[in-house]
Structures are given as structure tokens and as C-alpha cells.
Image (spheres, rainbow, N blue to C red):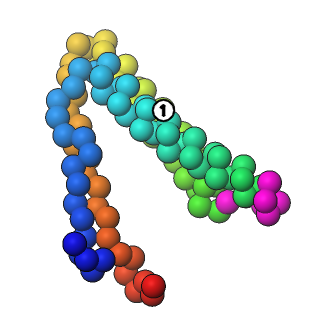
């Protein structure tokens, strides 16, 4: 595989109980939130300023977590299963110079 190609991976694909879906999604989003919180803290300690990307991502991730909790709790109360499909695309940034 060369850097000019985009790699497509299936991260999550399937039907899950509401409890399973909640656990899977909250762990993933929690990991991302933790990453950005640590990245922001590191930027503050090293450079005395917030990490701009993390400052944008943190509130979005927190809102996504609220939405996941709400949806999965409703599904739990209604004894519903949930379908999750998540794809990852990895490729070179356009106009990138290495």
C-alpha cells in the first residue's frame, strides 16, 4: 500500500444490545475526550496556552457523550437493540508536502 492510497477499515459493524452499544461508544468517546484533555493540559504546561484543536473538540465530544447516553438509555428502557456502523478512512492529507 502506498501513501497515495486511502485505507478503509471497518471499526464497528453490527447489532448490539443497548447496554453493549453504550459501553462500546462511551469507551471510545471517553478515550478521545481523555486524549484531548491531556493534549490541552500538556500544551498549557509546555507553552502556557490551550491547544486550539482540543479546545474545539472537547465540547463537541462532551455533547456527543450526552447524546449517546440519552439514546442508549432510551433504548435500554424500551428493550431495543442498536445498530452501529463505523468506518475509518486513512490517507494522505490533500496538498500535503512530506
Is residue 18 in view? Answer: yes
Q: Residue at x 25, y 70 (%)?
A: 6
Residue 60 locus on image (x, y percent): 52, 48
Residue 9 locus on image (x, y percent): 23, 54
**Residue highlighted by disc 1:** 66
As drawn, 11 above or below 88:
above
Q: Nearer the viewer, residue 62 or 13?
A: 13
As drawn, 42 above or below 19:
below
User: Magenta segment: does it hold 56?
Assistant: no
Q: Which stretch appears magenta?
A: 45-51
Is residue 67 in view? Answer: no
Whether residue 27 sits left or right of residue 46 in the image: it is left
Label total for image:
1
Q: Residues within 10 Å of mark 1 (few under 14, many from 20)?
A: few
Residue 96 locus on image (x, y percent): 43, 83
Q: Residue at x 19, y 40 (%)?
A: 13
As drawn, 23 above or below 9:
above
Q: Residue at x 43, y 32 (%)?
A: 27
As drawn, 72 above or below 44:
above
Q: Secondary structure at mark 1?
A: helix
Residue 10 locus on image (x, y percent): 21, 49
The quadrant of the rendering that contains the C terminus is bottom left
Q: Residue furthest front?
A: 1
Q: Nearer the viewer, residue 66 or 44?
A: 44
Quarter of image, res 23: top left
Quarter of image, res 34: top right
Q: Residue furthest left?
A: 14
The quadrant of the rendering that contains the N terminus is bottom left
Quarter of image, res 62: top right
Amino acid at each position: 500500500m502506498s501513501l497515495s492510497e486511502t485505507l478503509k477499515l471497518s471499526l464497528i459493524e453490527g447489532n448490539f444490545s443497548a447496554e453493549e452499544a453504550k459501553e462500546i461508544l462511551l469507551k471510545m468517546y471517553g478515550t478521545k475526550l481523555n486524549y484531548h484533555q491531556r493534549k490541552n493540559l500538556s500544551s498549557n504546561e509546555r507553552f502556557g496556552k490551550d491547544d486550539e484543536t482540543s479546545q474545539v473538540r472537547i465540547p463537541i465530544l462532551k455533547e456527543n457523550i450526552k447524546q449517546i447516553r440519552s439514546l442508549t438509555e432510551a433504548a435500554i428502557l424500551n428493550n431495543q437493540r442498536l445498530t452501529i456502523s463505523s468506518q475509518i478512512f486513512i490517507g494522505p492529507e490533500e496538498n500535503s508536502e512530506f
